[in-house]
Image: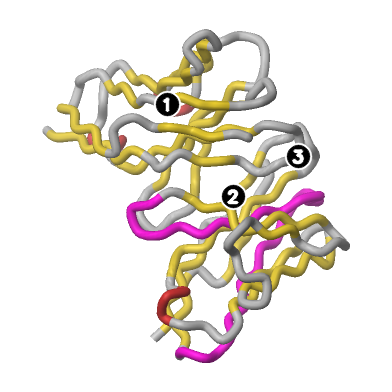
Amino acid sequence: AQSVTQLGSHVSVSEGALVLLRCNYSSSVPPYLFWYVQYPNQGLQLLLKYTTGATLVKGINGFEAEFKKSETSFHLTKPSAHMSDAAEYFCAVRGQAGTALIFGKGTTLSVSS
Amino acid sequence: GAVVSQHPSRVICKSGTSVKIECRSLDFQATTMFWYRQFPKKSLMLMATSNEGSKATYEQGVEKDKFLINHASLTLSTLTVTSAHPEDSSFYICSALRRANYGYTFGSGTRLTVV
């Protein structure tokens, strides 16, 4: 079975500061890993995903994540936060091909000026 | 790119009535569709998985008779909330999968309020 744990339900940073959102996963098969962002009353927007190959994945809006198998982690980072980054972020894992994504509980990112 | 259209975006209905939510893949054929429910400030909870032409597979604890899912074609899946009650009020999101190793495309969600 697959599961995702997002450490920290709420992260607050100042504009221009480093953003670090933590995600640990559990999977019985080699995982595909995803990060999504959600703005209020909207659907999910894919930030980036890891399937196979390079473990450092670059996504949209300056975000990146690194797959670390030994640590079962897939943390999301951005060097410099913008006010527009304030949103809900979800980490998700897929196990076997064709199955649903399983989501973590989400992390709310707040950015202050 | 792959686009999934979900309608309606918002719906208010009276307690006891039924509501149908549509999820349509506009530019690809979706072999599998997934339905999620999201409570306020909560994660997305998988409700069911549907494959075209087959009965949906529901997650444990999801009432099959209340949440009817139909996937009659490769481009359309519907979720019908039957005899809706206030506790069914939530944000429902669909996700479509083109092929097993292709990406997941999400609808924009439906905010259901039962009064």
Q: Name the residue under label 1.
A: A23
**Under tag 2, what secondary structure?**
strand
In the orientation shown, which residue stands out farthest toward the left? Answer: A113
Say what secondary structure mark 1 lies in: loop
Q: In this view, does A88 lie to the left or right of B73?
A: left
Q: What stretch is highlighted in magenta?
A: B15-42
Find disc 3 in the rendering and name its residue: A98
Q: Tell me whether marks 3 and 2 sit on the same chain.
A: no
- Extreme residue toward the right, this view: B53
Spatial CA distance of label 3 from label 2 is: 15 Å
Q: What residue is drawn where x is 35% and y is 43%? A: A88
Please name the amino acid that badge 1 sits on: Cys
**Is the residue marked by circle 2 packed among few (<14), some (14-19), or many (20+) residues within 10 Å?**
many
Viewer-proximal residue, A102 or A84?
A102
Locate residue B50 relative to residue A52 in the image: left or right.
right
Q: How far apart are marks 3 and 1 (CA)?
A: 22 Å
Label 3: element kind: loop
Residue positioned 49% across, 52% down in the render: A43
Q: Name the spot of residue A27 as percent of width and height, x first.
A: 61, 27
